[in-house]
């Protein structure tokens, strides 16, 4: 199964991505994890990404596309994967479509975790307090949520138009949300990866 998961910051996307992938038996491809791994990798691309991140810049679509293309070419992705954090732009959607078309495949579904804004703000403030994240204040969190909505809505519309979107209530106990996601995907809730 080839999946994409989207959701606002604080909706539990990372947690659900890991659980879904384990249950279905596919790899999670997280661009955030890949960028973090590049902090210690010694390759020309990793050095380039470190320079961009150190300067406070954004890693371009071109570089992100190359990183994802390389990762999707790994053997553990041959039978499926779950993308978390990619694509983020319409250009990246087109690149992903082309990459998958080259291998004669496409996405099977896009899971969109839906969460009430006030609940997400509360959840992120609690996490900031527990983890000591002084920069996660209500105003900053709301800006991140607005940015997510502005940047992600066009992608959600693309996948909705293609009939791939599975909107799932992302709030509630982790296991309940996982059950909703698996049900929306038509995957058995009791299958172990």
Image (cartoon, rainbow, N blue to C red):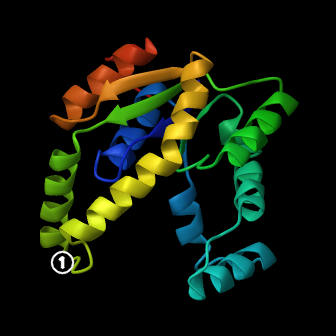
Q: Residue 33: x, y in percent?
A: 52, 61
Label 1: which secondary element? loop
The answer to whether residue 2 of the structure is visible from this angle is no
Quarter location, residue 154: top right
Neighbourhood count class around disc 1 (C-alpha, 10 Å): few under 14, some 14–19, many 20 upward: few
Tag count in the figure? Answer: 1
The answer to whether residue 106 of the structure is visible from this angle is yes
Question: Which residue is farthest right?
Answer: 102
Q: Is residue 67 left or right of residue 82?
A: right
Q: Is residue 81 above or below residue 179?
A: below
Q: Is residue 34 left or right of residue 148?
A: right
Q: Residue at x 62, y 46 (%)?
A: 87
Quarter location, residue 41: bottom right
- Residue nearer the viewer, 42 or 63: 63
- Residue nearer the viewer, 151 or 169: 151
Q: Residue 172: x, y in percent?
A: 16, 34
Q: Residue 186: x, y in percent?
A: 43, 11
Q: Is residue 17 left or right of residue 38?
A: left
Q: Which residue in the structure is indicated by mark 1?
A: 132
Q: Is residue 97 left or right of residue 156?
A: right
Q: Is residue 108 above or below residue 4?
A: above
Q: Residue at x 54, y 22 (%)?
A: 160
- Residue nearer the viewer, 63 or 88: 88
Q: Residue 134: x, y in percent?
A: 21, 81
Q: Residue at x 40, y 42 (%)?
A: 18
Q: Quadrant of the N terminus?
A: top right
Q: Residue at x 68, y 76 (%)?
A: 49
Q: Quadrant of the C terminus?
A: top left
Q: Is residue 75 above or below residue 137?
A: above
């Amino acid at each position: 199964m080839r999946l994409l998961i989207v959701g606002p910051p604080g909706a539990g996307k990372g947690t659900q991505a890991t659980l879904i992938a384990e249950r279905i038996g596919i790899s999670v491809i997280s661009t955030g994890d890949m960028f973090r791994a590049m902090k210690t990798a010694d390759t020309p691309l990793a050095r380039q990404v470190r320079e961009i991140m150190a300067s406070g810049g954004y890693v371009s679509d071109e570089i992100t596309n190359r990183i994802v293309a390389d990762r999707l070419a790994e053997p553990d992705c041959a039978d499926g994967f779950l993308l978390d954090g990619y694509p983020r732009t319409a250009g990246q959607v087109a690149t992903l479509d082309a990459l998958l078309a080259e291998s004669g495949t496409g996405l099977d579904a896009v899971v969109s975790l839906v969460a009430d804004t006030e609940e997400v703000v509360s959840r992120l403030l609690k996490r900031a307090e527990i983890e000591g994240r002084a920069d996660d204040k209500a105003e900053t969190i709301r800006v991140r949520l607005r940015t997510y909505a502005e940047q992600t809505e066009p992608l959600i519309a693309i996948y909705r138009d293609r009939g791939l979107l599975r909107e799932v209530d992302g709030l509630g106990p982790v296991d309940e949300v996982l059950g909703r996601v698996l049900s929306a995907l038509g995957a058995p809730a009791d299958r172990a990866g």
